[in-house]
Amino acid sequence: MAGKPLKILVCGDVEGNLSQLFKRVNNVNKKAGPFEMLLCVGEFFGPNDAEWNKYKTGQETAPMPVFILGPNKQENMKFIQDVKGCELCENITYLGKKGIFSGASGLQIAYLSGTEQKDQTIQEPSDFNKADIDALAVPLISDSKFKGVDVLMTSPWPRGVFKYASTAEGLDAETTGSSLIADLVLALRPRYHFSALEGAYYERLPYRNHKVLAESAKHATRFLGLAKVGNPAKQKYLYAFNIVPMKTMERDELVKQPQDVTECPYSWSSTKPEQKSQADMSNQYFFSQRGGQRGRGQKRSRGQHSGHEGQRKPPQPRGPCWFCLGSPEVEKHLVVSVGTSTYMALAKGGMVPDHVLILPIGHYRSMVDLPEDVISELDQYKAALRKYFKSVGKTCAIFERNFKTQHLQLQVVPIERSVCEDIKEVFMEKAEAQKLELFEIPTRTDLKQVIPADAPYFYLELDNGDKLLHRMKKSVFFPLQFGREVMACEELLDMPERANWKACTIEKDEETRQAAAFRKKFEPFDFNKDE
């Protein structure tokens, strides 16, 4: 049985005109309410601080719960105390940079603050980029039960919204909106999508989210662009609607198509045309930063190369390799655990006594090259190490440099848990200081989904699930010891003298002793110990 309909108000750019907005909201609420909430898209703040201060200080109060997106102008970030989301004053809440807001009724509201990043070298707090789109969409669409969201709030319009429909007066169909927003809409399949910033009111015909006869029926989406509060043309800036949360609806009712429904107007901004026509729209979300993609559920053809086949033989080294376990060059006294397809060794010239490496037994150059069976066992080692370090009051940073190396070495450096929350921030700061672009990738996203096999990169993974990636460019110098240098800095291990491994080497007898000591401590956590 369907749940109770919720009454919701949505407004466009407020630009600081709070008194005018709330006067209108009060009138609508008296005539047609009560409404559950007011959602605000577009630019909420304006140049008039005095009016905002009345609400901030409690002299005035918003007439109902108000949920806003973040600023689109950098100068308005001063109004936001916490970019992750916070209550700005009584009844007015900033949702955050991106995420899902779920009410007690089951209503799901997805939101993305800011405008699309224009300068690829600098990301302002009011910008969003593809990594933000991935971070919001991937965790949702990775769930096989995901149907879509009830509401999507963005400030920019989606690029291509006018296809199969009329064009809003005064707007250019070719240039209006953001391609990234269109990608986000394709991935999240909102039932209602609200945007602003264009200074116009536009209600598009609803469109379907499936291909007729080729896919099972899905719900339709309605897009609305809202005008500015108090605009002289008196275009509509406040929209009222009723909605029953998707979670409480019967499927037949949810997928019922309106009479005036059109085809979906959007196409993927980073996908080849032939891929678009063959893939299910619901599974087609892309992950690759270079433009290619493979949707969930899509299989590779037999002739297509893949890093996922567990049975393929590892490539052979072109010369002597210090890390292939069967090679005579391997310093076997450093080996502390051996699995089926991976092994673990004490790091030569380690930063701390428990600094270890996880390596594939076969000759694989990077994480991106690994087949699934090797990845699976490598993940087992990571999990076992995290348990071990946790038992001794530590956390660890796991990083890889796929650059000027021929065999994968996953560095695992333990550090006191008290600085756990600082690691990500310190890496970001040090990268920025060296003009290196270090961006965050979603927790559930595999490296293979965001970077090609032949691309050089630096990758960092933390206990809390945070993942950072730097894609190296020929034009930007990358320090070979970047991972060690950051871990050795004052904010973390505070041992700058150990940034270079060559300065940390010890005699073979001492290496053997340290390896034996670690092997004994790690034994209760080693999943290979009984084999």
Image (cartoon, grey):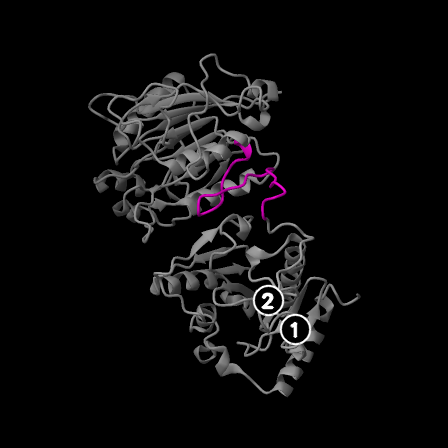
Q: Quadrant of the N terminus?
A: top right
| Nearer to us in this view, 59 or 471 | 471
Range of magenta residues: 281-305
Tag 1: residue type?
Answer: Ser
Considering the whole magenta stretch, tell me its main secondary structure.
Answer: loop
Q: CA distance from mark 1 to mark 2?
A: 10 Å
Please, what secondary structure does the residue beneath circle 2 have? loop
For residue 194, say whether it is visible: yes
Location of residue 51 in the rendering, given as x and y in whole percent from the top left corner: 24, 38
Upstream in sequence: badge 1 or badge 2: 2
Rendering coords of residue 452 (x, y %): 50, 52
Residue 295 is a magenta residue: yes
**Magenta stretch: includes residue 32:** no
Q: Is residue 170 left or right of residue 205?
A: left
The picture places residue 330, in percent across and down from the top left corner, at 64, 76
Q: Is residue 449 above or below residue 41?
A: below
Q: Which residue is situated farthest in the right direction here? A: 530
Q: Quadrant of residue 490?
A: bottom left
Pointer 1 residue: 327
- For this rendering, which residue is in front, 264 or 290? 290
Place of residue 67 in the rendered image (x, y in percent of width and height, measured from the top left): 40, 36
- Mark 2 is surrounded, within 10 Å at the Cα level, by few (under 14), some (14 to 19) or many (20 or more) other residues, namely some
- Kindly identify the residue that appears in the image at 57 percent across and 64 percent down: 408
CA neighbours of label 1 inside 10 A, class few (<14), some (14 to 19), many (20+): some
- In the figure, is residue 393 to the left or right of 55? right
- Which numbered disc covers residue 317? 2
Q: Secondary structure at mark 1?
A: loop
Q: Is residue 475 above or below residue 43?
A: below
Answer yes or no: is residue 106 visible. Answer: no
* Front-most of residues 118 and 268: 268
In the image as oriented, which residue stretches furthest toward the top? Answer: 259
